Image (cartoon, grey):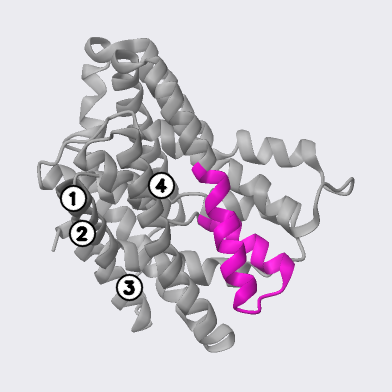
Amino acid sequence: MDPVVLFFVFGLVAGLLKSELKLPAALYETLSIILLLAIGLHGGVELAEQASTQLLGQAGLVLLLGMGLPLLAFVLLRGLRFDRVNAAAVAAHYGSVSAGTFAVVVAFLASREVAFESYMPLFVAILEIPAILVGIVLAKGISRDTQWRELGREIFLGKSIMLLLGGLVIGAIAGKEAIKPLEPLYTSMFKPVLAFFLLEMGLIASGQLGALKQFGLRLAAFALLMPLLGALIGALLARFMGLSLGGTAMLATLAASASYIAVPAALRLALPEANPSLSLTASLGITFPFNILIGIPLYLALAEQLIAWGL
């Protein structure tokens, strides 16, 4: 098992044992900023060299993926007898993506020397936005009561989107040669920063598991089934787009992940009546650990199998 994943396991176990271990809040914020900027910078550098009309078409398909996944999640949740508002709120988390999961799959593929399309951070940014809007419409339609201006600020000017897009723009403008002094951010420094980030994520995830006593097996079943369905859809779309083995595994992972940063912040404004414990228990307490410990290797194996079948 990759050492960075063991840091997550360590944090998870420490949290479940009620240990006093805790990272300073400022350090966690700093680590997340470094990771998001590093991902954006690396993607921007490569985007400058690979921008094309083909990439524009791929971005459009990824946007449709971000709209389709929350619709599928909503149907599943309603089938499991969740009320409309909470089903829509949870579905929005599963149409969006986890930047933490993306950072782990980047490290996982790099450790196995599996190449992937390095403009993938662009897809992360694209997938953050449409699911939030779909979730709001599913919950209450186009309502005058929705504070669209404030919601727009939260979506487009929120921390994760700004850092990713800011890194992309800086990397694209500066180019590979000018960015070299900053390369350690996404090379030698990346895995140590990710390890400490996952330690804190393990501690946070352990605190969400207790909510299963309240919400039961229905939520757990959804939080384990949805990433598998999302990964299959993402992998098939990646093969249709002609992505490489690594790109297929990565898009499958993105489609399998669930947001726990950008979407909760946006939905606090748009759907204050939704129960945030449902969303965080599913996305952070169940889906995130599943993807980190089991899912990512499984999605790589799925990509290999699809390529072997000639898809």
Q: Amino acid at mark 2?
A: Pro
Quadrant of the image containing the N terminus = bottom left
- What main secondary structure does the magenta stretch of the protein show? helix
Secondary element under disc 1, as helix, strand or loop, is: loop
User: Is residue 160 visible to the viewer in this orientation of the structure?
Assistant: no
Magenta span includes 67 = yes
Which one is earlier in the sequence, the residue at label 4 or at label 1?
4
Judged left or right of residue 276, residue 187 is left
**Amino acid at pointer 4:** Ala
Snapshot quadrant of residue 140: bottom right
Question: Hey, what amino acid is under mark 1?
Answer: Trp
Spatial distance from mark 4 to mark 1, Cα to Cα? 30 Å
Split into 4 quadrants, where in the image is the C terminus? top left
Q: For the residues marked 1 and 3, what is the alpha-carbon distance in whole angstroms? A: 38 Å
Residue 271 appears anywhere in the view? yes
Name which residue lies at 47% across and 28% down: 165
Chain-order first, disc 3 or disc 4 = 3
Q: Which residue is mark 1?
A: 309
Spatial CA distance of label 3 from label 2 is 20 Å
From the top left corner, tell me how far across and down residue 298 is, in percent: 23, 61
Frontmost residue, 125 versus 228: 228
Q: For marks 4 and 2, give the CA distance.
A: 17 Å
Give the residue furthest to the front: 310
The extreme right residue here reads: 144
Q: Which mark is residue 12?
A: 3
The circle on residue 99 is 4
Q: Residue at x 15, y 58 (%)?
A: 2
